Amino acid sequence: MSPRTLRSDLYSFTSEEERTAPPLVISVLASLLERTISRNQRGIAGNGNLKDERIAAFESSSVLDMSIQSFLERVFRYAHLAPPVYVVAYVYMDRLCQFNQGLHIVSTNVHRLLITSIMVASKFVEDLNYCNSYFAKIGGLSTAELNSLEMNFLFLMGFRLNVSPSIFESYCSHLEREVSFGGGYQIERCLRNYMCGVEIASKERKRPESKNQLAKVL
């Protein structure tokens, strides 16, 4: 996979009929998150600020028996989200950690953080969206639980969801470096320097009629 190939994938809004394979950004994002978790779990004994109920809500007592890449591929298979949604979701997760020093992405919270950030990102990027209950099925949660996670997520983010074109571009560049150099730690460190901004164009998509999908999450 080359940075040029990833770039064309990140900026594409193909129809559901045209896209059958998961976008390349899923593999890159999964690899980067796996390294982040490995580094965090070596350096800390879990999340130290679980007295914050909003952070604790994302923790699970067990680790989901599904890799991050498989989980992201599952989300793509059933939600058919455009590649930019995953980039914005990653911006949100990074921003969430910046705003909440007691929050670390680890194996016990990554899936809940992912499904919540992806759902919120889809609402920001795209014109048409599935309802929360559908995302809950994909993520293996009850609708009430995902609604609660979304509310906690928004408050932890301070409702700062704007992602400007320049910020989007910078995160795409970091993902491209991940492809070029495999430097997960280097990219993570660079991301800490960014803040937020304005709006990303979206494209209306045709929704499939069948929505009888399953799920699991932490």
Image (cartoon, rainbow, N blue to C red):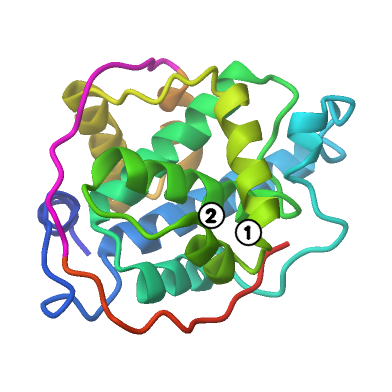
Q: Residue 98 is drawn in which quadrant? A: top right
Which quadrant of the rendered structure holds the C terminus?
Answer: bottom right
Q: Nearer the viewer, mark 2 or mark 1?
A: 1
Q: Which mark is residue 81?
A: none
At a point 30% along the width and 68% down the height, the residue shown is 80
Q: Which residue is mark 1?
A: 143
Residue 210 image-quadrant placement = bottom left
Residue at the image position 38 percent from the left and 15 percent from the top:
195
Magenta region: which residues?
193-205
Question: Pointer 1: residues within 10 angstroms few (<14), some, or many (20+)?
Answer: some
Magenta: main secondary structure: loop
Give how far apart the Cα atoms at labels 2 and 1 are: 12 Å
Query: At 13% across and 59% down in the image, what residue appears?
Result: 5
| Magenta region includes residue 140 | no
Q: Nearer the viewer, residue 150 or 21?
A: 150
- Per the image, label 2 sits on a secondary structure element best described as helix
Task: Specify the amino acid type for callout 2.
Answer: Ile
Of labels 2 and 1, earlier in sequence is 2
Relative to 80, is 168 above or below? Answer: above
Residue 145 place in picture, x, y as percent? 70, 53
In the rendered image, residue 121, in percent from the top left (x then y), is placed at: 38, 42
Report the amino acid beneath label 1: Thr
Task: Residue under label 2, please give it.
Answer: 115
Q: Is residue 202 magenta?
A: yes
Quadrant housing residue 67: bottom right
- Circle 1 SS class: helix
Residue 66 visible in image: yes
